[in-house]
Amino acid sequence: MKTKLTLALTAVTCATLLTGCNKEEAKEAAAPAGIAPQIFTDSLFAVMKSDRTNYTKLIVQRLGPNKGDFIKPNEHWEDMAEGAPLPAQMFRYGAEGVADMTSDFTYSLQSIWPINSQNAPKTPLEKEGLQFVSDNPGQNFYGEEKLGDVTYYTAVYADVAVSPACTTCHNEHKDTPRTDFKIGDVMGGVVIRVPLASR
Amino acid sequence: MKKMIWLLWLVSTLALAGFLGYELAYEKEKPNFLIGKSTHGHYQIELACDACHTSPFGGEEVLQDACVSCHGDELKASLDSHPKKKFTDPRNADLISVLDARQCVSCHSEHNPDITHPMGLTLPEDYCVQCHADVGEERPTHKGLTFETCASAGCHNYHDNRALYEDFLLKHAHDRTPSPQQLLPSTLKQYLASQRVEWPEENLHSIKGHAQVQAVTTPEIEHEWLSSAHGQAGVGCNSCHTSAPSELWIEKPGHQQCQSCHTAEVKGFLAGKHGMRLAQKLSPMTPEQARQPMQTDAGHAQLGCNSCHNAHTDNRIAASTEACLGCHADDHSLAFEQSPHGQLWQQVLSGERTAEEAVSCATCHMPRESVDHYGDSFTQVQHNQNATLRPNEKMIRSSCMSCHTLAFSIDALADEKLINNNFSGSPDNHIESIDMAVSRDVKHR
């Protein structure tokens, strides 16, 4: 009798546990799967890189002083009749426009050889990431960092010189800390941050 | 006896609560709720609490929205060197923790007269050091300079550096000829056409066809109108003295009527100290309410468009200096007539030169600006006389450089004594910003 009761209780307990497990699994299966942070940031970077390359090659290189000389890419383009935003400014305007619309991610262009010192890496993870993509061409850098009270998933992607417009301007600028950039060199990095839900 | 005291206390409390409650809920001006003297920029509207505190609910974002609603366009036009968007990236969390540059009130808090500096700044004047402490490493010329001098020596401004940024200094370092002056179209008709304004053209015969005009007009008014810019452009009585759709006769048209054609001018007027009370639906500004010295006999004059622009003669020459000096009595204004600028203006009054070849009060304080609108470019007069007043380097490009070099303009505007005597003499000190820019450029080449 005692054995039968024990078996019955065990069966009920197992059934309850199994049923519970199945419910959790079913719930997970029904919920829409989230995008992994790395896929999210990789996808964002793909769009950014494509737009950035196109602006640099199709507008600045083709129409600027390196070829057609119809426009004058300049930091103070707003103050010039023929002025056009520099590729780095165009990229920043995109980041600022995004910041006006969402705080789900932020991004910036940085370099360990910045013309504007405000664009040097600041956080320990930025410094590590920028150095990593510079030392390991073709590889990206991923990590997590806490800024203020928020933890971020931070991805760093190499920013590579794609045209003479990049190298000439950076090598000749009076504020540049490096003057030997060549096409194909890693000049800096794109840092994308995604705030993670508090844990 | 005790009951009487309690009753008296209760009645007094209720009366006071009723009095204050009524003021809070129904009065436009709330003097009993002013928590401290406001800055020179806002004192005219300080009793209209809801000008800035637009909602009883919410915190800093309410004040921030109020700041931006009045000053946002101006900041944008000034190519603001420190816009909010530069500080919203999380990587700037360390900077924000020291100085929250995302909020206007971090640097410009109101009702704090004891800590308010020029420009309405309520931070210690060495605020630049918070982020730019290492400037000496990047700019050897800046080594040893003290941090309260960044924005007080004619070199940098926090927001508007259009006349001070390095490439601009270099571009004009060796200028010997002035930049071309903006010219308005020669007639009102051409000016209104450039602004895409349409109006029914009238003449002396047609205006008398309106019964209301016939009832009030006199030969003197008709003569004034015919001689005026409005008369010559065919802008008839009804264009100003009636308002669509009612077409009721308005005896004394105000800025609401003027703005139907002069939209940008009235917008500027309402944004400046002359019109900001009207913009808040308060009574018009009067010189007696001003904090700076004013002519005593002008104390009660109510400021509107007609204070400077006579209704029918519409004399732009008188409006550009005589009208100003009729009220303003500070040292700078009183020194105008004897100053080199004032002497040139005397030659305009005597017909020896044109207004475009001289300097009036308006030349500097209400400059002509080139405006681009969807590809169209036209010139208009900035009627917000505060738009170029502080910091005064804002008037370098809009006014000074029409006649002077950049180097002289920077030096002159940094000389308080010279400003007070209305630029009678030469600057005592030389500001080295152009020299620094040139020396850095030479080293780079």
Image (spheres, coloured by chain):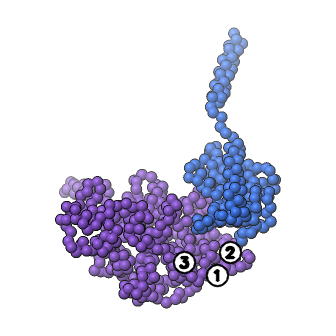
Chain colours: A blue, B purple
- Amino acid at dot 3: Ser
Between residues B293 and B303, which one lies in front from this camera angle?
A: B303
**Residue placed under numbered mark 3 in the picture:** B179
> Which residue: 42% across, 80% down?
B355
Between residues A184 and B45, which one lies in front from this camera angle?
A: A184
Assess disc 2: are there few (<14), some (14-19) or many (≥20) residues with their C-alpha within 10 Å of its C-alpha.
Answer: few
The quarter of the picture where residue A80 lies is bottom right
Assess disc 3: are there few (<14), some (14-19) or many (≥20) residues with their C-alpha within 10 Å of its C-alpha.
Answer: some
- Amino acid at dot 1: Asp
Going by the image, does B337 lie left or right of B370? left
**Residue placed under numbered mark 2 in the picture:** B139
Q: Is label 2 in a helix, a strand or a loop?
A: loop
User: How far apart are labels 3 and 1 at the CA level?
Assistant: 21 Å
Judging from the image, mark 2 belongs to the subunit labelled B
Q: Are marks 2 and 3 in contact (CB under 8 Å)?
A: no
Q: Closer to the camera: disc 2 or disc 3? A: 3
The quarter of the picture where residue A158 lies is bottom right
Residue B221 x/y as whole percent: 24, 72
Q: Closer to the camera: disc 3 or disc 1? A: 3
> Which residue: 68% across, 48% down?
A47
**Residue placed under numbered mark 1 in the picture:** B435
